[in-house]
Image: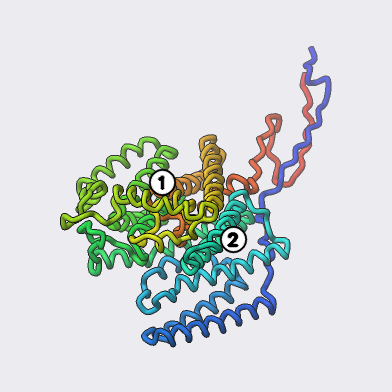
Amino acid sequence: MTDVASSYTDRVSVRIAPEDTPAPPPVLPTPGPMSLFVVLVAVCAGIGAALAFQATNPDTPIVILGGTVLSAAVFGIVGLYRYEWFLLGTLAIRPALDDLIADEFGTFQPSAILGILAILVTLLHLISLRTTGNWNRPTPLGLAFIGFFFFFVPSFITSVDRGVSQGAMFGIASVTLLYLACEQAMLRDREFVWKLLIASGIGMIVPIITGYVQFFWTGTLDEGGSGLVRIDGSFAHPNPFASYLVFSLLILVGIIPTLEVKQKLWIGIGAFMSGFIMIATFARGAWAAFLLGSLLMAYRVNKKFVWVILGGAMVAFAVVPGVGDRVGNLFATTGEGGGAKTDDSLAWRIGYWGKVWPLFWNNPVSGVGIDATKTLTVEAKDPHNSFLQPLIEGGIIGGIGFFILLFVASTAGIRVWRRLRRGDFDNRTRMLAVGALAGLFSIAAQLLTENVLLNTILWWYLNIALAYIAVLTWGPQPEPDPEPDLNRLQLPAAGDTVQRDLEGTQ
């Protein structure tokens, strides 16, 4: 009897794709004479500003001013030729500039100089990408950032304090441009995110060391009347420092499982040191945000860790000196000396929200002016609510820009979360995405009670996670490996075509 397979000969052709080879890096333009001319003009303007500032403030050392301007000029020239170096260097040094040498400079801060430099160099970089064909279409989140900036322009124009609003607009401009730069870099090469994280990790060194110096030697008593010594590192205030540490910690914890043993050890030590200083800031909003972010991460990675985290929080509450008092102070109505409480308790904040909300009706369309709330209140404080602030200071127009940005970012986060549940990513991408989402969620949890909206230094690092989530959602997706052919009898070499005769036998 003849087998059915022997009645014909089937010729099968299988083509195996050649092994993946890294794509050549894009050819980026080198600056021409016009770019160098712009730098020279900036240097001359900077030196002129330094001399003018020194003339009006004789106590400010001109050597420090001149050295800062010269360093900024050199850094700017490097950025025009090698923008990647500029971006990584900016992230590595920014946290060290907020409060270390404030006394010598007054309002002429190195952080402000770096922010203006970042705007100029990044803008030239993005223009060069556009004109040379290396520009990728922005994701919806990139477009939302651009809209976020322009929706606050009317607020600046009609501001009751144009000087204060000008500084805030420069901050928003730097955040928007640096986000676009991060997004463009990751659209070309998603793995660039790891270079950004390394630079950000280097940036944590000075604030952490400064925090330990303050904890053991130079800490000062909290002016809010809590009776505690609060740590602010190289930042201007403990609360933004704590928010920065919370976000950084969650990213670090997220990537630890993807590293080798030695790397895990070093990152683990850094995370532990950062966690201790984060507790020493005594920022209650940051503590709650870290707890929420950790629970989100544990739920996605291993649900059993939820109980470990809750247990650790209870131990910290019971054992670490000052934690219980600080939490109890949250609902206090009297100060340390028995008088009326004037610091940032929850009750005080709720009362302050009611006080600043009527300012919205001063100009419902474009607001009182970005960052101008503090100039209209006796307390001279921001609203301590990042949902009220864009409405009060930006009016309906600014509020629309902020809520569109929040909606688009939330949409990207939800889509990535769903893809994590489906197992669409490899382990390295999965853990980084979980850390990014946990970090962003922790910051979102602070929008209700903290001044996050204009915290420029925090946004510079949020940009990394936001751009990564946006690229995972809307960027080019790597092609999945082809399913193996069930009829294939032998795996051919890469790039070869194999033809086989399947002949039946009697």
Q: Quadrant of residue 283?
A: bottom left
Image-based side of 221 in relation to 118, left or right: left
Q: Quadrant of residue 33?
A: bottom right
Quadrant housing the C terminus? top right
Would residue 256 be seen by someone viewing this image from the given angle? no
Image-based side of 26 in relation to 91, left or right: right
Image-based side of 450 in relation to 143, left or right: left
Q: Residues within 10 Å of mark 2 (few under 14, many from 20)?
A: many
Of all residues, the one furthest to the front in this rendering is: 362
Quadrant housing the N terminus? top right
Give percent across and percent down for residue 366.
54, 55
Q: CA distance from mark 1 to mark 2?
A: 26 Å
Q: Which mark is residue 181?
A: 2
Give percent across and percent down for residue 314.
25, 42
N-term-proximal mark, 1 vs 2: 2
Q: Secondary structure at mark 2?
A: helix
Image-based side of 1 in relation to 170, left or right: right
Position of 108 relative to 162 (above/below): below
User: Would you name the residue on which mark 1 appears?
Assistant: 445
Q: How many marks?
A: 2
Give percent across and percent down for residue 440.
46, 49
The amino acid type found where label 2 is placed reads: Ala
Q: Nearer the viewer, residue 296 or 104?
A: 104
Colouring of the image: rainbow
Would residue 444 be seen by someone viewing this image from the given angle? yes
Q: Nearer the viewer, residue 424 or 500?
A: 424
